[in-house]
Image (tube, grey):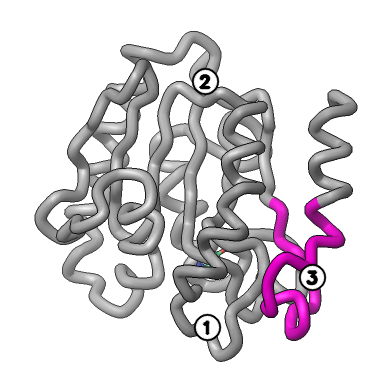
Amino acid sequence: MDNSWESLKNQCMTCQKCDLCKTRKNVVFGIGNPRSEVVFIGEGPGEQEDIQGKPFVGRSGQLLDKMLKAVDLSRDENIYIANIVKCRPPKNRDPLPAEQDSCIKWLDKQLDFIKPKIIVTLGRIAAMKFVKPDIKITQEHGVFYDRDGTIFMATLHPAALLRNPARKPMAFQDFLNLREKIKEVCKHTYK
Ligand code: URA
C-alpha cells in the first residue's frame, strides 16, 4: 500500500489526542480496501472491536456483513469501513463531542486519501457528523445527498436493528437503493 497511507496509519496507531487512549486496548484504524469507491462510517469501537483492533466484528458487525453481502459488497474486496472515533469509549457510551472532534481528523485524512464516491453513515452519531447535525435517522435514512460530487446517505446502525428487528426491512431497502446508486456512479465497485 501507498507510503502515505501506511504513514497515516502508523501515526494514528500511537495517537494520544484524547483520554480514550488511556482505556483502549487497540486503536481501530479501519478495515477494507483503501482504493474503494464506497466507505461506511460507524460510531466507535465496542468491546470486541477494541480487543481485535478491527471495526464491526461483534454481533452488529455480523449483521452488517450479511447486509453487505446481500448487495455484493464486502470488506475484503470493494468497500472500506471506519468509525468516527478510533478508540472504544468506556462502557460503550456515546463518544463525547471533544473526542469526536479530535479523532475525526484521522478519518478526514483517510477520506482525503480514499476519495470515495459514496459515504454511508451507520447510526445517529455518524449521520450527525456527515449528513445533517439534526438528523432524525428513522425518518431521514436512505436519502442521497450530493455534496460537491460526493454522495452521502445515512442508514440505521446494525446494533439498532438488533435491538429492534422490525426496522430491518427499512435498512435493507436502503442497501438495495445503495446498490442502484453504486451502479449509477461507481466504475469499479461491481465488476
Ligand atoms: N459499532 C460501531 O459503530 N462501530 C464498530 O466498529 C462496532 C460497533
Disc 1: CA contacts within 10 A as few (<14), some (14-19) or many (>=20): few
Asked whether residue 189 is drawn in magenta, I would say no
Pinpoint residue 15: horizontal percent, then vertical percent.
Answer: 79, 61
Q: Is residue 6 left or right of residue 45?
A: right
| Residue situated in front as seen by the camera: 70 or 35 | 35
The amino acid pointed to by label 1 is: Asn
Image side of residue 75 versus residue 179, left or right: right
Where is residue 126 shown, x and y percent of the image?
40, 56
Front tag of 2 and 1:
1
Q: Which residue is mark 3?
A: 26
Separation (CA) of disc 3 from disc 1: 15 Å
Stretch of the chain drawn in magenta: 12-29
- Rendered location of residue 98, percent (x, y): 52, 69
56 is higher (above) or lower (below) than 159: above
Q: Residue at x 34, y 27 (%)?
A: 151
Q: Secondary structure at mark 3?
A: loop
Q: Which residue is mark 2?
A: 189
Label 3 Cα crowd, 10 Å radius (few <14 / some 14-19 / many 20+): some
Pointer 1 residue: 92
In the image, farthest residue toward the bottom: 91
Tell me the quadrant of the picture where the N terminus can be found: top right
Which residue is pictured at 62% across the width and 65% down the height?
Answer: 57
User: Secondary structure under badge 2?
Assistant: loop
Cα separation between marks 2 and 1: 33 Å
Please determine whether, in this image, residue 100 is positioned above or below residue 10. below
